Amino acid sequence: MDIMDKLKILTDAAKYDVACTSSGNDRSNDGNGLGSAVGCGICHTFAADGRCVSLLKVLMTNYCVYDCKYCVNRQSNDTRRTAFTPRELADLTIAFYRRNYIEGLFLSSGVIQNPNYTCERMIKALSILRYEYHFQGYIHAKAIPGADPKLIAQLGLLADRMSCNIELPSQESLARLAPDKTKTSILAPMALIRDKQQENKAELIRYQHAPSFAPAGQSTQMIVGASPETDYQILKLTEGLYHKYSLKRVFFSAYTPVVENPLLPALDAKPPLLREHRLYQADWLLRFYHFEADEILDPEHPTFNPLVDPKCNWALHHPELFPVEINRAPYEILLRVPGIGPRSAKRILTARRMAPLNFDGLKKIGVVLKRAQYFILCNGRTAAGLVLSQDTVIRSLLSTQGVEHMNSYLQMQPEQLSLFDPSAAQLQTLIKEGIAL
Ligand code: SF4
């Protein structure tokens, strides 16, 4: 098999990892210039300074001795298999880099022979890149669950970011759908990476030129919709992972059926994209808005409201806290207002030191008044002509687009319905009424 065939198979097999976004461009070189945007697994990530960096997203191999039911690369799946040698992968990365197609590498792998052997091959490829080619670009490497801690530690010294995918939100689902993996085998490398990073920070203070261990931190990915866990369970787990393992990001991937299996959703089931979207919104609230998972959802309300985002949903459930007087509210309360983000909350604090703010001033500051106006007062007044009542607020917040999303959502995941806990029939009535701005 030539290198281009290997590349096609191994970039295609890597596309289900959502830790970075695929470009999807398929324009090839016409022979008259330099460069090509041919679709061979280029994805993007963001550097610490906000630059968008393109990466070659590829597997070392799609051979796998494990049999995770949801995965195209599982042992029992009849698919074309191949593997890069470490040298091939390093040469290919450098060839892409020299042609300016990529600025870095996102390297994952199926488990070939055993986790240690797989990890050794990845280390070999990255060593060629770092020590032979002196490649200093961004490298994201997957930690292989079950590999020896010493190998994972070695991999971390070669990579900028590491990730260890938790994949399923509970031990029960792992046992059912990924019988070769356990919660412990996934969490152990995460804990190791966390500890190594802490040690490394201390080393770097003492020895300025000590090698860095995964300086861009670690992340993980969770599949949503392949197993029965609720949004609440997923969000609680996400919160726990941030606290316990100092993760940079938890990524969510709506399960796309690629294999037929009685334990999984049917092949024609649509991926729960709205659910994935709500999880990302809630994740944002955990990381930047000082929310706790139990404030967003709870065991009695374990699913997201499909019609409004989690922050609006929270605000609508706490009418006693609103409206907030924008010229007096502390930062923590401003952050809770839908339409006000951390940056606009800070700008409000600065601006109101000079003079009281009005609605025009808030707009200039970057507050999304379309949403915020239902929850705020400026100098004791509401926005012109606005009467605040929960009913008008709910109806105003539901856009036509939201109703369309809701319609498709009803078809995808009827069990997820909840608008302040009415029945599905009530929701259908709301939709028929065509609630719009
Ligand atoms: S370990 Fe599981 S998820 Fe990873 S490649 Fe193998 S079968 Fe797929």
Image (spheres, rainbow, N blue to C red):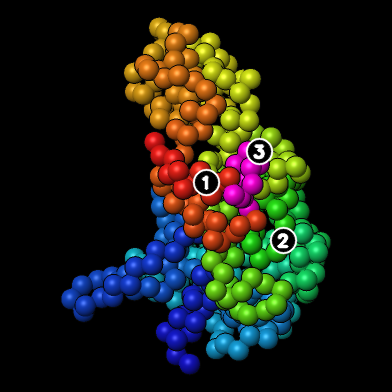
On residue 429, which mark appears? 1
Looking at numbered disc 3 in the image, what kind of residue is underneath it? Ile
One can see residue 292 in this view = no
Task: Report the residue marked by disc 3.
Answer: 296
Name the amino acid type tagged 2. Answer: Pro
* Residue 140 on image: x %, y %: 56, 61
Residue at the (65%, 56%) spot, across then down: 415
Residue 189, above or below 309: below
Q: Is mark 3 within 8 Å of ligand 1?
A: no
Q: Residue most toward the bottom?
A: 1
Relative to residue 206, is residue 85 drawn left or right? left
Residue 270 in picture, x, y percent from top left = 54, 66
Q: Which residue in the protein does label 2 denote? A: 228
Which mark lies nearer to you, 2 or 1? 1
Mark 1: amino acid: Thr
Which x, y percent locates residue 422?
63, 42
Of the image marks 2 and 1, the number of the one nearer the N terminus: 2
State the residue lying farthest toward the left: 32
Q: Earlier in the sequence, mark 3 or mark 1?
A: 3
Residue span colored magenta: 416-425
Q: Quadrant of residue 155?
A: bottom right
Considering only vertical position in the picture, is 194 above or below 376?
below
| Position of residue 288 in the picture relative to residue 202 (left or right) | left
Q: Main secondary structure of the magenta part?
A: loop
In the figure, 264 relative to 346: above or below? Answer: below
